[in-house]
Structure formats: structure tokens, C-alpha cells
Image (cartoon, rainbow, N blue to C red):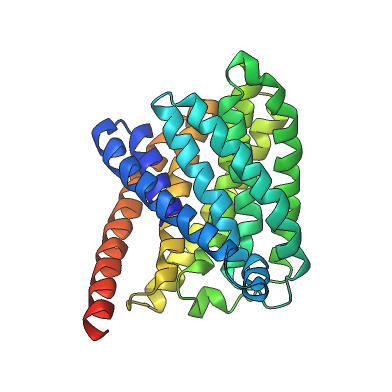
């Protein structure tokens, strides 16, 4: 929920809808607070259960969700809060990523791509902060993490259960979302590196974005051919790639000067917003039904 709501808020800001951005960013912050409390409560739970939870890819949503919120806060110049989130993210990433990667097996679900999403979320936030002179040193570590995130993507891709494209309940969309955030990370890093953007980094951004868009089309066609209309919490993992692809296209268009990419991103923002609204309504109805049955 945090990742999905936050990236839709960022996309709305890129499209010029500041008032809607403020509303969704406030929702994102509230959801992040719930996520943080839940995370720390799990740390206080039994050790065996805690260790098992830390090995699951979904634990990395704590990193990715914090990154999206940090970027949103920077839209309104809350630099200190964003820097604090980056520090928390770095610690959580260092603790969680090795445990998750060690326990990745064959026939992985889409959630496994969170190893890339969490890594690139660090790159996006660090690169955004690096535009300010005191934080310029973040450019080089961000570049190293960008490369690592791409390597992790290929690692998960080699073990991914492609049957999820046909049967997945929502998180299979992270197959595209992990590339979209990688393209956004390239764009942010290119912007932080200076103007004009380094040609190799700009070319890499466009190649990754093209691959993300190809997966986007394939996944959309698979959904149309085999609709999955029932509510599932994993549908939030569908909203995130939709919003991330829109934000990546708009940002890449600005960095590369390709106006049509900006237009494409603005067009893709509306399906992301519509699906966010549908999933949000489904979540509320599901929570109400659960409470009634209890």
C-alpha cells in the first residue's frame, strides 16, 4: 500500500496535480507509520518467527516503501526527513537483503523482484538528494547500487516462475515494476551527474525503460486474456508497477528531451490511478467484511 500510494502521488506531481499529490502523500505517510509499527512489533515477536519473516522478499517493502515516501517528501523540500529515511533504508537493506537472497529458490513469485526494487529505491532517493552540493558524494555509491540492482534482476529472472504471468494474483507485475524503477534510478542518477546527462547512462535508461514497457504490454494482455477480478492484497503489487512505469516514462522524457516519453507517462498515469482506486475500495470492503465475520 505504501509503495503503490506513494508512487501514484509522485506521478501526479510530475503531471502537475499538486493538490492530489498532497492528499495521497499524506495517506502514504500514515500507511508508512502503520508499516513501521508493524515492523517493530514483529522484531519483538518470537525469534524463530522473526527470522522466518526476515527471509521473505516481502520484508524488503520496508525499504522500498520508505524510499517512495522519501522521494515524495523531497517534492515539498523536507530534506532532513528524506535523509533520515535514507539512513534507515540503508540499514534495513544491509540487514535484510543478504538473508532474502540466500533463501531464494527456484520457481520464484513476482515478490522476489523486491530485491531489485528495494536496491533501486535507495538509488532513486540517494540520487534525488545528490542534486544538492553537500550530498554530491552519493552519486558514486548510487551508481554501484544501480548495477547491483540490475544483476539481482537477472538473477531473479533466471528463477522466476513464468506461469505467474498467466495465473499470478498481482505481484507478478513486479516483473515490469522492477525494471521501471531501474529506469527511474538511471534517470535520477543521470540528472544528479549533471547536464547534459552522461550518454551511456541515458542510453541504459532508455533500454531498460523499453524492456519495462514490453513487459507492461505483455502483462496487460495476459490480464485481458485471463481476468482475475477477485480482491487480493497482492494487487497492491500491481498498482506499484503501473504507477512506477508512468513516473519513469515522464522522468526519462525530461532527462532525454524526448517529449513523447513524457506524454506516454502522463497517459499511463491514469490507468495507474484508476487501478489504485479500485484496489483501495477492494481493500476497504475486504477489511469491513473481515471485521463483520469476526
| Furthest residue toward bottom | 293
Near-viewer residue (48 or 6): 48
Judge whether 157 appears above or below 31 on screen.
below
71 lies left or right of 206? left
Judge whether 68 appears above or below 203 on screen.
below
Asked where in the image residue 136 lies, by quadrant, the reply is top right
Judge whether 106 appears above or below 25 on screen.
below
Asked where in the image residue 200 lies, by quadrant, the reply is top right
Near-viewer residue (144 or 37): 37
Judge whether 257 appears above or below 205 on screen.
above
51 lies left or right of 24? right
| Furthest residue toward top | 133
Place of residue 190 in the rendered image (x, y in percent of width and height, measured from the top left): 63, 27
Which quarter of the figure is the N terminus placed in? Answer: bottom left
Residue 253 seen from this side:
yes
The residue located at (78%, 66%) in the rendering is: 102
Which quarter of the figure is the C terminus placed in? Answer: bottom left
Place of residue 78 in the rendered image (x, y in percent of width and height, measured from the top left): 44, 26
Near-viewer residue (217 or 176): 176
The residue located at (25%, 77%) in the rendering is: 291
Residue 249 seen from this side:
no
Place of residue 129 in the rendered image (x, y in percent of width and height, measured from the top left): 57, 26
The residue located at (48%, 43%) in the rendering is: 68
Amino acid at each position: 500500500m505504501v509503495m503503490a500510494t506513494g508512487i501514484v502521488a509522485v506521478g501526479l506531481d510530475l503531471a502537475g496535480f499538486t493538490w492530489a499529490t498532497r492528499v495521497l502523500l499524506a495517506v502514504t505517510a500514515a500507511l508508512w507509520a502503520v508499516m513501521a509499527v508493524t515492523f517493530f512489533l514483529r522484531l519483538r515477536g518470537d525469534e524463530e518467527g522473526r527470522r522466518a519473516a526476515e527471509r521473505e522478499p516481502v520484508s524488503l517493502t520496508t525499504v522500498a516503501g520508505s524510499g517512495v515516501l522519501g522521494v515524495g517528501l523531497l517534492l515539498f523540500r523536507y530534506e532532513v526527513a528524506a535523509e533520515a529515511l535514507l539512513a534507515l533504508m540503508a540499514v534495513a537493506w544491509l540487514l535484510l537483503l543478504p538473508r532474502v537472497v540466500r533463501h531464494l529458490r527456484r520457481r520464484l513469485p513476482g515478490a522476489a523482484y523486491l530485491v531489485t526494487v528495494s536496491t533501486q529505491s535507495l538509488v532513486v532517493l540517494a540520487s534525488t538528494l545528490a542534486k544538492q552540493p553537500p550530498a554530491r558524494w552519493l552519486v558514486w555509491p548510487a551508481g554501484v547500487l544501480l548495477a547491483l540492482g540490475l544483476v539481482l534482476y537477472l538473477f531473479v529472472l533466471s528463477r522466476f516462475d513464468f506461469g505467474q504471468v498467466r495465473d499470478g494474483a498481482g505481484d507478478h507485475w513486479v516483473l515490469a515494476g522492477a525494471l521501471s524503477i531501474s529506469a527511474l534510478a538511471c534517470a535520477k542518477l543521470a540528472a544528479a551527474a549533471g547536464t547534459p546527462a552522461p550518454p551511456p547512462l541515458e542510453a541504459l535508461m532508455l533500454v531498460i525503460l523499453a524492456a519495462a514497457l514490453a513487459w507492461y504490454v505483455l502483462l496487460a494482455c495476459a490480464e485481458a486474456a485471463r481476468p482475475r477480478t477477485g480482491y487480493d492484497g497482492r494487487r497492491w503489487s500491481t498498482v506499484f508497477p503501473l504507477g512506477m512505469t508512468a513516473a519513469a516514462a515522464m522522468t526519462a522524457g525530461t532527462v532525454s528531451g524526448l517529449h513523447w516519453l513524457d506524454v506516454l507517462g502522463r497517459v499511463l498515469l491514469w490507468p495507474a490511478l484508476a487501478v489504485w482506486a479500485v484496489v483501495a475500495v477492494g481493500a476497504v470492503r475486504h477489511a469491513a467484511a473481515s471485521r463483520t465475520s469476526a
